[in-house]
């Protein structure tokens, strides 16, 4: 058995090396990994046969003037991944290749389907997307899913997700039954942090926070190069953080039952609610007042919108101060629907943080398109025991 495991380990090492270093020859790989040339050659032959890599003749001859070496590259289309991001407003579904490129995506309205067997609706939509793009289920390695709530990753159970009304839902088991492939489930913000780790901030930093602003607010923690989930998978549930003691002692509106204080001050729906309250709700409909529209009005100088957004910025900044104090990350990345409106207001947030905090932290808005879908794909690569396991 021992020989077999060493071989598997070497095989994984070689494949990961090829994944991260395009266009090397067999002897390059052997010297880089300090594995003997014959061993590397056997592994490369196996990987070629299994379709994980490609090999083509180099453009130029070797330095000694001998025959041209063969350059090896990773086959990012050897198999595919389905990434699913379940949000309070919409469910996004994508087919990804092994480099994390989104090949095709679709979405469905969350709230319209919450009471209509949401899990089955999502599975049907996955099948539909695969059919449309002429993929067979056999070409799919597995599925990663981000869920808006506290999730038991080991057992694939959603413990509490207020926006979709789920408590103790065995999402992994139900999805595997409907999709007939491995499924992995985690909190949506952890999944976004994984996307950032694969394609964004994580390329340079091993300690960063991903804070997503959507229906509520959440925080994914990458600490010392790994995802920190907490003792009961509830790490980063900063929606329950209190950023104004006096306001917290009064009754405050919960956007969704089970939402916390910070959720109800920095989530998209809470921005809309505040604006309507200032306007006198009688003549207004909430669907006409998206958070995005209120941000735009604030930028254009509308006094009421400015007041609402300043309140939002204040709560968000104090929330960030508290989190940064505890974890001292290299950087904080803001993501989620609401973050798309934040670039203009970043200096204001940074200024507030600097006023109260001597610790320097970079704060930015994510530049990774589809960060949660990509992270859902990475969740599968991270959790599923395959040769690609990261």
Image (cartoon, rainbow, N blue to C red):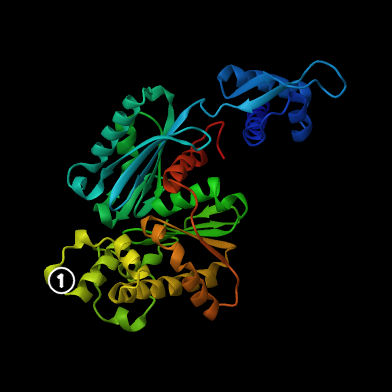
Q: Residue 86 or 35: which is nearer the viewer?
A: 86
Question: Residue 88: where, in percent of width, then height?
Answer: 29, 53
Tally of numbered tags? 1
- The residue at the point 37 percent across, 68 percent down is 299
| Residue of label 1 | 281
70 to the left or right of 323 = right
Quarter of the image where the C terminus is located: top right
Question: Residue 172: where, in percent of width, then height?
Answer: 35, 40
Q: Residue furthest bottom?
A: 246
Q: Residue 200 or 34: which is nearer the viewer?
A: 200
322 to the left or right of 92 = right
Work out whether 203 lies above or below 287: above
Work out whether 139 lies above or below 216: above
Quarter of the image where the N terminus is located: top right
Q: Which SS class for mark 1? A: helix
Q: Residue furthest left?
A: 282
Question: Residue 126: where, in percent of width, then height?
Answer: 32, 33
- The residue at the point 51 percent across, 75 percent down is 351
Q: Residue 276 or 329: which is nearer the viewer?
A: 276
Name the quadrant containing residue 63.
Answer: top right
């Amino acid at each position: 058995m021992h020989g077999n495991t060493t071989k598997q380990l070497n095989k994984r090492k070689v494949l990961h090396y090829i994944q991260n270093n395009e266009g090397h020859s067999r002897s390059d790989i052997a010297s880089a990994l300090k594995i003997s040339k014959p061993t590397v050659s056997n592994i490369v032959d196996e990987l070629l046969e299994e379709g994980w890599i490609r090999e083509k003749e180099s453009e130029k001859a070797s330095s000694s003037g001998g025959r041209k070496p063969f350059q090896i590259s990773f086959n990012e289309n050897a198999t595919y991944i389905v990434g699913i991001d379940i949000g309070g407003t919409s469910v996004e579904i994508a087919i990804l290749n092994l480099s994390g490129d989104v090949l095709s995506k679709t979405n469905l309205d969350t709230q319209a389907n919450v009471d209509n067997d949401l899990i089955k609706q999502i599975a049907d939509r996955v099948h539909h997307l695969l059919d449309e793009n002429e993929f067979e289920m056999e070409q799919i390695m597995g599925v990663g899913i981000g869920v808006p709530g506290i999730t038991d990753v080991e057992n694939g159970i959603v413990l509490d997700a207020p926006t979709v009304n789920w408590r103790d839902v065995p999402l992994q088991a139900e999805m595997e039954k409907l999709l007939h492939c491995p499924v992995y489930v985690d909190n949506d913000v952890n999944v976004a942090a994984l996307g950032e780790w694969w394609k964004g901030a994580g390329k340079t930093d091993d300690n960063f926070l991903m804070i997503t602003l959507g229906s509520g607010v959440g925080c994914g923690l990458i600490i010392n190069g790994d995802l920190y989930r907490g003792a009961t998978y509830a790490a980063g549930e900063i929606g329950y953080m209190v950023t104004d003691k006096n306001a917290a002692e009064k009754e405050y509106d919960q956007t969704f039952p089970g939402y916390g204080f910070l959720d109800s001050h920095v989530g998209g729906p809470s921005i809309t609610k505040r604006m309507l309250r200032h306007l006198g709700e009688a003549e207004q409909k909430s669907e006409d007042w998206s958070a995005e529209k209120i941000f735009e009005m604030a930028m254009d100088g509308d006094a009421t919108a400015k007041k609402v957004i300043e309140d939002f910025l204040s709560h968000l900044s104090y929330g960030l101060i508290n989190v940064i104090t505890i974890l001292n990350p290299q950087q904080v990345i803001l993501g989620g629907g609401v973050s798309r409106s934040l670039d203009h207001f970043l200096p204001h947030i940074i200024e507030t943080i600097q006023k109260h905090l001597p610790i320097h932290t970079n704060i930015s808005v994510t530049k990774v398109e589809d960060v949660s879908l990509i992270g859902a794909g990475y969740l599968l690569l991270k959790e599923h025991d395959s040769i690609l396991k990261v």
